[in-house]
Image (cartoon, rainbow, N blue to C red):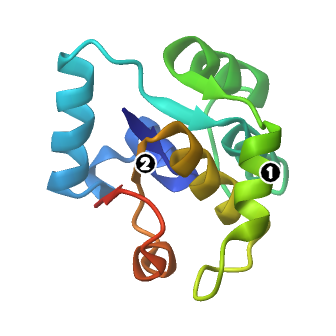
Amino acid sequence: MIQLDTHSLLWLALQPEKLSQQAVSAINASVNAGEKIAVSVITLWEIAHLARRGRIHLHVAIEEFLETVEASYRVVPLTRAIAIQAAELQEPFPKDPMDRLIAATAIVEGNILVTRDSAIHQAKVCKLVW
């Protein structure tokens, strides 16, 4: 199953031209296979945080945007297994707690994470596509 990193979800929704061809192909293949694309619950928090701080502009209310995400994607909750996996990620994995929780979600769920984040790619802790 495909899981979107926060920026991948935002780009898919707001600026699809920013996605790589490989990312688009993976997303389309997942949708065509009848799978519901996953996002970590942490992604909802990140979007709300970025919008409230004015770092992103959604063109609709934050609540409406997140409601659409919840209806359109499989939102994976934070679990004990994900929390433990995030805490156990070793260097060179980034220290950012949100990146750690998103990658840990992909690891625990066995998802392919769609991310452009080069630090996550360099860490090689989960299946990735970009």
Query: Can you give x and y, in whole percent of width and height, for residue 83 in the image?
Result: 80, 51
Precedes in sequence: disc 2 or disc 1: 2
Image depth: mark 2 or mark 1 in front: 1
Label annotation for residue 74:
none
Q: Nearer the viewer, residue 55 or 105?
A: 105
SS class, disc 1: helix
79 displayed left or right of 26: right
What residue is rendered at 51% in x and 45% in y?
10
Quick check: 118 above or below 78?
A: below
Query: Can you give x and y, in whole percent of width and height, for residue 64 in the image?
Result: 70, 19
Query: Can you give x and y, in whole percent of width and height, for residue 76 in the image?
Result: 65, 29
Where does the N terminus fall, quadrant-wise?
Answer: top left
Which kind of residue does numbered mark 1 sit on? Ala
Residue 40, can we see it? yes
18 displayed left or right of 11: left
Q: Specify the quadrant of the image occupied by residue 86.
A: bottom right
Where does the C terminus fall, quadrant-wise?
Answer: bottom left
SS class, disc 2: helix
Quick check: 121 above or below 49?
A: below
Which kind of residue does numbered mark 2 sit on? Trp
The residue carrying mark 1 is 83
Q: Specify the quadrant of the image occupied by residue 77.
A: top right
